[in-house]
Amino acid sequence: MKILCFIILSTLFLGSIKAEEGNLIKKNRFELTPEINGKLVSEGSPIAGAVIELAIGAMGDTLVHQSITDQNGNFYFDEVVVNKLNSPGVFDEQLVSVSIDTDIEDKNIKIWRTMTAGYRLKPFMTSNLSNLTCDVNSELKYFIFSIDSNDYEVHSVCELKGSNESGKY
């Protein structure tokens, strides 16, 4: 009788684990970049076929993604989120570097370059990276965004909105 009770309870327990297998172990969510939509132009004319490179440095790794502009100069990257079982280590500085570049006629164009603290997206990133318009002939500028007594600097040829300060780099 004890064996039968053990088998029944074991079956119920294992069935409940299977039903909740997605929730059995909680993973940490590290948000590195939002979804990115942009348009690359030269004096208003779209640039088709340009290779756009997104490089993300975080947690001791570098992730590299590429996109190619379509006939309208548009490019796109999915959001980049890393789900890990472990929390950041004691020596993890929790810094995320994001760089978006392209090369046009042997000239490197900085579409976006920044370093942020923490693994949560900042509002200036989501609002600007969702709708970039970048003229490859524009001068490189710096933009300062202030959030919770922290200043974040972005270097870009794109027109960004919501900065506290900007100027030629």
Image: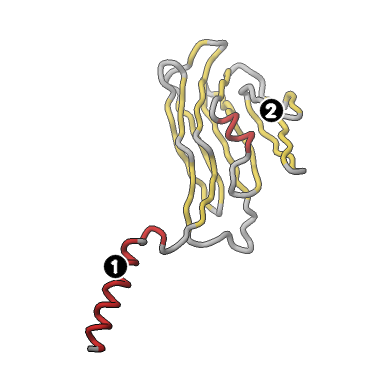
To which residue does mark 2 refer? 162
Dot 1 lies on which element? Answer: helix
Q: Are marks 1 and 2 in contact (CB under 8 Å)?
A: no
Expressed as whole percent of the image width and height from the top left, the position of residue 148 reads 74, 43
Identity, as a three-letter code, of the amino acid under mark 1: Gly
**29 and 155: which one is in front?**
29
Dot 2 lies on which element? Answer: loop
- Give the mark toward the camera: 1 or 2: 1
Seen at 30% across and 71% down, the residue is 14
Seen at 53% across and 16% down, the residue is 41
Position of the N terminus, as image quadrant, is: bottom left
**143 and 7: which one is in front?**
7
Expressed as whole percent of the image width and height from the top left, the position of residue 76 reads 46, 29
Q: Exactly how many numbered labels are in the figure?
A: 2
Res 99 quadrant in image: top right
Relative horizontal placement of residue 99, taking residue 84 as reference (left or right): right
Identity, as a three-letter code, of the amino acid under mark 2: Gly
Mark 1 → mark 2, Cα distance in angstroms: 52 Å
Seen at 29% across and 72% down, the residue is 12
Q: Residue furthest bottom?
A: 1
Seen at 49% across and 33% down, the residue is 53
Mark carried by residue 15: 1
Nearer the N terminus, badge 1 or badge 2?
A: 1
**106 and 56: which one is in front?**
56
Position of the C terminus, as image quadrant, is: top right
Expressed as whole percent of the image width and height from the top left, the position of residue 155 reads 66, 31
